[in-house]
Amino acid sequence: MRDLLLIGLYALIAGGLVGLAGAGALRLLRGGSVAVHISALLVITVAAVVAGVVVIAKAMFLSAHDLQVVLVTVGAAAVVSLVLGIMFGRRLAAQAMWAAGAEKSRRDLVAWVSHDLRTPLAGLRAMAEALEDGVVDDPATVAEYHHRIRLETDRMSALVDDLFELSRINAGALRLSPSVVPLGDVVSDAIANAAPLAASRGIRIVAPEHGWPVVTASEPELARVVGNLLMNSVRYTPADGTVQIDAGRDRDDVWLTVSDSCGGIPEADLPQVFDVAFRGSRARTPTDSAGGGLGLAIVRGLVEAHGGRVRAGNVDGGCRFEVRLPA
């Protein structure tokens, strides 16, 4: 019993010394990443075990051969433990960082939605109270209030639809139903939907009449992608500007581009254009307030759900959005 107590004491002292040294090392690494901290903690733990085993082996006066066997065995176990621990530790660190980023995005989205709904709701309430109290009674003003109430209601309905779509994408609840889709038909429908807004501001939408490829995709989601890109370009293009749509097919991808004459996107904004609630800098302000800042985020989510990719870049006098889907 006395020998076991001594063995435990020696192992505890050896592990404790390693632990103290490790605590100092962790203090020096306090500014490092989560992966670095996990790796350092694994090294300290394994080193404490090795130190305890070595101290006890020496105290037991093992022969040189037996001591080598013990050290080789402990060393092999330590290497396996460190490799597996660091590998899975990095994965846990990545998941922790992703979760932290997702939580921040969720908080930002909730704050943004609260802010974006407060103004139209206050306006709707004011107009409804004015109508209810009879403050406004002449037919022309009443009709104008009704018109503005309908517009704000439509805007909030579109915002709720976008939020629902984005939540499906982020939650992994999106279920695609791929089929062979003529891209020309999808573009034609998107142009028809954007035509009233474009015509009211003298914007020309240019698209080739022939040569449209077919693509294997889920048609409703693909229509949403094309429609969002087209409406985004129309909103940001100044009056009497031009929006052009092109498409084609190469060996690996079917591609579609939407180019406008908005004057370009500031280089600092390019990495953020597909972020939730991003509406652009003051130099690139939409000409109407219908956009909720979710359209391009939905585009990226839907394109990536198809295994594709989307990017934005500047061209002469404007910007271009390019979607690529697997051929």
Image: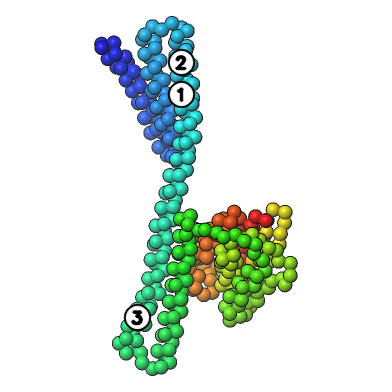
Marks 2, 3: nearer the viewer: 2
Among the two numbered marks 2 and 1 on one chain, the one whose residue lies closer to the N terminus = 2
Q: Find disc 1 in the rendering and name its residue.
A: 78
Q: Position of residue 112 (x, y in %)?
A: 41, 63
Q: For the residue marked with disc 1, what is the amino acid?
A: Ala
x 46%, y 32%: residue: 85
Q: Are marks 2 and 1 in contact (CB under 8 Å)?
A: no
Work out whether 121 lies above or below 168.
Answer: below
Q: Find disc 2 in the rendering and name its residue.
A: 71
Q: For the residue marked with disc 3, what is the amino acid?
A: Ala
Q: Which mark is residue 126?
A: 3
Work out whether 105 lies above or below 66.
Answer: below
Image quarter where the C terminus lies is bottom right
Residue that extends furthest to the bottom in the rendered view of this protein? 138
Q: Position of residue 42 (x, y in %)?
A: 42, 30
x 39%, y 62%: residue: 111
Q: Quadrant location of residue 268? A: bottom right
Image quarter where the N terminus lies is top left
Q: Secondary structure at mark 1?
A: helix
x 43%, y 48%: residue: 99
